[in-house]
Image (tube, rainbow, N blue to C red):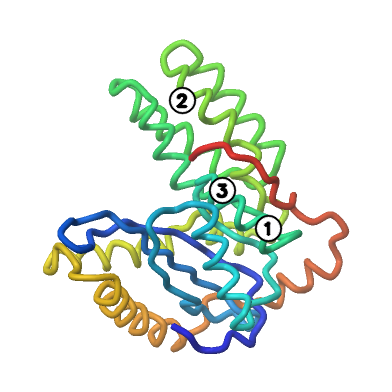
Amino acid sequence: MNRRLDAAYPFIIVDALFTKVRTDKSVVSKALLIASGIRADGYREILGLSIGDSESFATWNEFFRGLKARGLHGVDVAVSDNHSGLREAIAKQFVGATWQRCQFHVMKNLLDHAPKKERENVTAAARLIFLATDRKEAERRYAEFMARFAETAPKSCVCLEGAFEDMFAILPLPEKYRRRLRTSNMQERLNEEIRRREKVIRIFPNDAAAIRMVGALLSEQNDEWLSRAYFDMTEYFEWKATTVAKPAAVKRDRRAA
């Protein structure tokens, strides 16, 4: 996890999960920070792994600084949830990059705020918004959602209103890239496998043990990813060369996920 990152990585996906680690005589929850990237040639790689006490701005900022010191460059799009420290660190370290708010996490937030009897309806209506192919269609479906659930799921409406702009940051991109970059699900699947193996250990004896186990798993995944391309990037670079208006760059604020 300390190799040079000499290629350009137009797309990065970042996420964290918490695990139990023994420290002296107590057991604490620590954040495993993981970054994946899609290179300019369309292949995926695990970029880095770190462990910290929290998902604070300082922790994420130091993680990204480390990736850049190893050569990470050329980032056009960063996909993540809306954790304020993470978002601020992306804005600081990848100036001018587009930030895409993960639609999977938006959906989770909508359902967390929806009454139980409306969750199925909220899910179906939100999916229609997420699958919109252009701005006009997205706005129409958004308006329909807000009108439909204003009375029955008002907190979900507030949540969607706050997320709408950021969850469509990649809408200008060609469709095949939008489909895979609208969520951090690629990273979520890694997290699920980490959780599965973590159950055997339950509590790591120290930070180094957590890094060894998770690092070994990520190395396996990295080798598998490098066996085949994830994207044909030709259309993306043609689009980038001919498009004057880029997707909105990261806005630095502290809205919680």
Q: Nearer the viewer, mark 2 or mark 1?
A: 1
Q: Which residue is mark 1?
A: 92
Q: Quadrant of the N terminus?
A: bottom left
Disc 3 element: strand
Real-space Cα separation, disc 3 to disc 2, in angstroms: 17 Å
Label disc, if present, on residue 219 of the rendered structure: none
Q: Nearer the viewer, residue 193 or 84?
A: 84
Real-space Cα separation, disc 2 to disc 1, in angstroms: 30 Å
Q: Check the image and name the residue furthest to the top.
A: 151
Q: Which residue is mark 3?
A: 101
- Near mark 2 (Cα within 10 A), the count class, few <14, some 14-19 or many ≥20, is many
Real-space Cα separation, disc 1 to disc 3, in angstroms: 16 Å
Give the answer, above or below, for where 122 lies relative to 11: above
Query: Identity of the amino acid at label 3?
Result: Arg
Place residue 194 in its image quadrant. Answer: bottom left
Q: Is residue 173 left or right of residue 176?
A: right
- Near mark 3 (Cα within 10 A), the count class, few <14, some 14-19 or many ≥20, is many
Q: Check the image and name the residue furthest to the front.
A: 24
Q: Check the image and name the residue furthest to the left.
A: 200
Q: Residue at x 60, y 60 (%)?
A: 78
Q: Which residue is mark 2?
A: 156
